[in-house]
Amino acid sequence: MSRSLILSSLVAVLLTAASTAHAQFKVGTVDMNLVFTSYYKTKDAESKINDARGSAKKDLDSRLEVLKKSMDEINTRGKDIEKPELSKEAKADKTKLRDEKVQEARNLDREIADFRTTKENQLKEQFVRMRKDIIDDIMKIMQGKIKSAGYDMVFDKSGLSMGQIPVVLYSRGDLDFSKELIEELNKNAPKAAAPAAQ
């Protein structure tokens, strides 16, 4: 029997046992995806990441434009070198200037690649930090709700097993306290920022 099937069976048994012995064993469910996306700080974080990504793209586009101009100049110089009326000395001078431009373009190309990698890594790190802070906020509020309501066990009903099967196959609607959690998380949100709990 696969691990995910065993886990799903265990959850089903626990939920069934919980419904028959509700007074002795209190089970709750939370849709963590819904809670995460409904938390106003998630929207703020997405907006900050999108702003940073847009700013990085502008910087990158600006550098790529400089590189494109440099490549155009190299092509123009290459065509000049091919002119038959040029003297040997003039051709050598133009070739030297073109080769210097080629080297500048190569250096700029390397700088652009480094810039792109650095910015991508910075954005990933920023996203991971923001996500961790948001999850920490959610878990702190959830732990308070779990203690105050006296839950013995709480399941994330948005969770999937390794086989991409929902871990919680069924739960009664009254076991879910996602809405209360979202309301608690958003109670201090700026006026227009708090999304309604669904």
Image: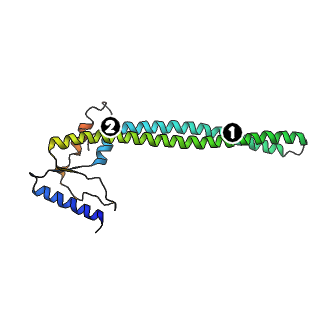
Question: What is the number of the mark on residue 163?
Answer: none
The amino acid pointed to by label 2 is Tyr
Count of residue discs: 2
The amino acid pointed to by label 1 is Lys
**Residue 157, above or below 53:** below
**Residue at image coords 29%, 46%:** 34
Residue 137 placement: quadrant: top left
> Helix, strand, or loop for circle 1?
helix
Horizontal side of residue 71 vs 178, given as left or right: right
Circle 2 residue: 40
**Residue at image coords 27%, 31%:** 188
Where residue 22 sits: x, y (%)? 10, 53
Horizontal side of residue 72 vs 93, given as left or right: left
| Image quadrant occupied by the N terminus | bottom left
Q: Residues within 10 Å of mark 2 (few under 14, many from 20)?
A: many
Q: Earlier in the sequence, mark 2 or mark 1?
A: 2
Where residue 165 sits: x, y (%)? 31, 61
Q: Residues within 10 Å of mark 1 (few under 14, many from 20)?
A: few
Where residue 138 sits: x, y (%)? 28, 41
**Residue 24, above or below 40:** below
| Image quadrant occupied by the C terminus | top left
- The answer to the question of whether label 2 and label 1 lie on touching residues, with beta carbons closer than 8 A, is no
**Residue at image coords 77%, 42%:** 99
Question: What is the number of the mark on residue 69?
Answer: 1
Name the one closer to the observer, 56 or 108: 108
Residue 130 placement: quadrant: top left
> Helix, strand, or loop for circle 2?
helix
Residue 96 placement: quadrant: top right
Name the one closer to the observer, 22 or 33: 22
Residues at marks 2 and 1, CA–CA distance in whole angstroms: 44 Å
Where residue 15 sits: x, y (%)? 17, 57
